[in-house]
Image (tube, rainbow, N blue to C red):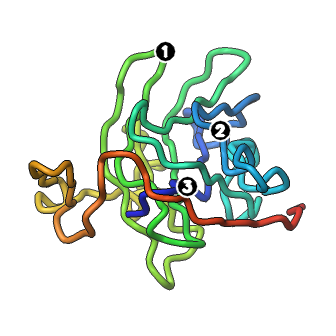
Amino acid sequence: SDVHYVGLAGVELYDLVGRPLRPKRAVSNHGSVRNLPGMERDVRTEEAFLHGSPDISGHMWLAPFCRQPPNSVELVFDEPVHISCIKLWNYARTPTRGVRDVEIYVDDILIYQGVMRQKQAGFTASAGEAVLFTDDKQIVERERDHVYLPSADELIAFFDESGQVQQCGGPLVPTGLPMGRPMTAMHDVLP
């Protein structure tokens, strides 16, 4: 995983009959790379989550990685909604910048905690990962191939005395202050 940045390619929420829902606002507690000096024109902002799946919108979100408090994005609706499924697309431009640990809260109550796969070459945008909150047979069947169940090995993290963290099979990630953050830029305005 990347010690400087974290991102998602998209999030889509679906109502009880499987139709896409559109939040009115998206807010990230650490903003996006647009908040970094020299990156004011970068298009990878949390507003990407207002446009639906990445294969439709082409938008994505990238933010400076922060351990405390951890990066989060809040999706806000103007009125109560019923959600049957949340689909997440991991960041693909630089796969190591994708999200690993996911927690979903509704009204400050944890309703889901899980792990996302790192995007791989040949992994298409339409293959987002689904989190189901329904037993509706049509929705379950539609999303069956998109539900990810990690192995026990993927859920293990090792910590040592020097403040290093290692996800099983992954690179060491320092928990202290980040090293100098490398530049990243994407200035093209997407439709």
Looking at the picture, which amino acid does disc 3 mark?
Gly
Q: Secondary structure at mark 1?
A: loop
Q: Circle 3 is placed at which residue position?
A: 7
Q: Residue at x 25, y 69 (%)?
A: 170
* Mark 2: few/some/many CA within 10 Å (<14, 14-19, 20+): some
Looking at the picture, which amino acid does disc 2 mark?
Gly
5 vs 102, nearest the viewer: 5
Nearer the camera: disc 2 or disc 3: 2
Could you give the CA–CA distance between mark 2 and mark 3, rounded to whole angstroms? 11 Å
In which quadrant of the rendered image does the C terminus lie?
A: bottom right
Image disc number at residue 107: 1
Answer whether residue 91 is visible to the viewer in this image. Answer: yes
Could you give the CA–CA distance between mark 1 and mark 3, rounded to whole angstroms? 23 Å
Q: Position of residue 93 (x, y in %)?
A: 60, 72
Single out the residue that lies furthest toward the bottom. 122
Q: Circle 2 is placed at which residue position?
A: 31
17 vs 68, nearest the viewer: 68
